[in-house]
Amino acid sequence: MENVTIKVPNNFMLGAAVSAWQTEGWIGKRDSQDSYLDIWYKNNKHVWHNGYGPAGATNFYQRYEEDIDYMKEIGLTHFRTSINWSRFLIDYENAIVDEEYAAYVDDVIEKLIQNGVEPMICLEHYEVPAVLFEKYGGWESKHVVELFVQYANKVFERYGDKVKHWFTFNEPIVVQTRVYLDAIRWPFEQSTKKWMQWNYNKVLATAKVVNLFKDLQLKDKNGAKIGVILNPEVTYARSTATHDQQAAKMYDLFFNRIFLDPSIKGEYPKELFDVMKKHGITFDFTEEELNLIKDNTVDYVGLNLYFPHRVKARTAGWNEQTPFHPAYYYEIFELPGKKMNPYRGWEIYPQIMYDMGIRMKEEYDNIEWFIAENGMGVENEKRFKDASNMIQDDYRIEFIREHLKWLLKAVEEGVNCKGYMLWAFTDNVSPMNAFKNRYGLVEIDLEDNRNRHLKKSAYWYKQLIESRKFEAENDENYK
């Protein structure tokens, strides 16, 4: 099959991402500064692969200078991470800053800028303070929304003149989906209505922080922008039949449009209110709040895209004795013959990049956006080491190449996508999977003091960033 040369636009971001809790570790953290992830780990450690969790992570807290040197070597144009809300403050009610942690964040941002890497900062990547989770139920509480705005104000005051890329949340739907909808993570409480309230309060919190951002005039002062990072699951129906199409539409409503629509368009789909009322799961809201959401949409969005989601109409009856779950309207469809990443259990279908891009153009007014996460997790990568001790991760290179190929095809067709951020810069801890599946351009050697080694993909990515082009297969579908 012939290859095609894909060119990358000069202003197109090519970077990588990690989060605070997945990299920092607990060195320097006070006992009172646990996040939700920290108390989950403490209360339910046995479900984390080989017992690894946020306690050690990659020790970015002490080794960030070394890691940023690697970023410079690779040539990353941008690096996205988070500020750990639970560590940034020592008093969450009064927004009293932990000066030691804030100085660390300051150093990270300064060193990134000095090395030509643009920092992109997220205010919450699952790091809601444990005390707020235990005292108020976390994002179930409107009071926590107000505390988040206070925290954001302190962060903007401190770094608003240096950072130009801001985000309220990373994947705001995830924690409550695992905890309250599917009840598969500590503390294992099934409450669909609580799930819906968390969803709403995070949308409200984003709007309030956007409003604060405008009041502080950060866009006027240094061209800064604020957005949110969402993880829409690109959803395909099993067939063209009406019942399967409706199943996909309902899945999309509950898991994608529930954040995309209010964040970008400023309003929820009417059908969401209808279905919430039908099932008794309507979130607590006021008209004043809905108006605030309408008036404070985001400047841009980051989208985390990894795999497609395929659904079909239900073939089994619904047990009316169980609480409502969106699966009332759909079942998962397993596509025969699909290409898989067997380690993560995810389908590999690079065309999601193109399909989501066209949707952003056609349904969301072609808002500016970028890929905030995309990557491939593989287990036991050490077996791919060569004689020079370098991991030969050609599978990751192929994964990036194919996804970028489809993404840039969308850009050629006028889609307003401004960049691609690989997950992840280094191997890092993931919820439950810990270090089982490795995602990084940079290996973290757990047996050797968490020392770092560049993988083959790091050198390939470096070449891509320098040359702004790459070779890819010109397969039938792509043509």
Image (spheres, grey):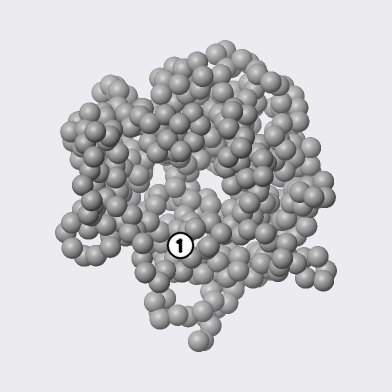
* Residue 9 shows up from this direction: no
Q: Residue at x 55, y 66 (%)?
A: 399
Q: Position of residue 456 (x, y in %)?
A: 71, 67
Q: Which residue is mark 1?
A: 347
Q: Position of residue 51 (x, y in %)?
A: 67, 40
Quarter assignment of residue 286: top left
> Is 423 rendered above or below residue 8?
above
| Most foreground residue, 28 or 434 | 434
| Most foreground residue, 14 or 101 | 101
> Is residue 345 rendered to the left or right of residue 237?
right
Secondary structure under the numbered disc 1 in the rendered image: strand
> Is residue 363 rendered to the left or right of residue 232?
left
Q: Position of residue 145 (x, y in %)?
A: 45, 23
Quarter assignment of residue 397: bottom right
> Is 201 rendered above or below residue 241?
above
Q: Amino acid at mark 1?
A: Glu
| Most foreground residue, 447 or 318 | 318
Q: Position of residue 184 (x, y in %)?
A: 46, 38
* Residue 324 shows up from this direction: yes
> Is residue 285 rendered to the left or right of residue 401?
left
In this view, the residue farthest toward the top is 94
Q: Residue at x 49, y 58 (%)?
A: 345
For disc 1, the neighbor class at 10 Å (few under 14, some 14 to 19, many from 20) is: some
In this view, the residue farthest toward the bottom is 1
> Is 18 rendered above or below residue 462?
above
Total numbered labels placed on residues in the image: 1
> Is 91 rendered above or below residue 451?
above
| Most foreground residue, 122 or 198 | 198
In the rendered image, the quadrant that contains the C terminus is bottom left
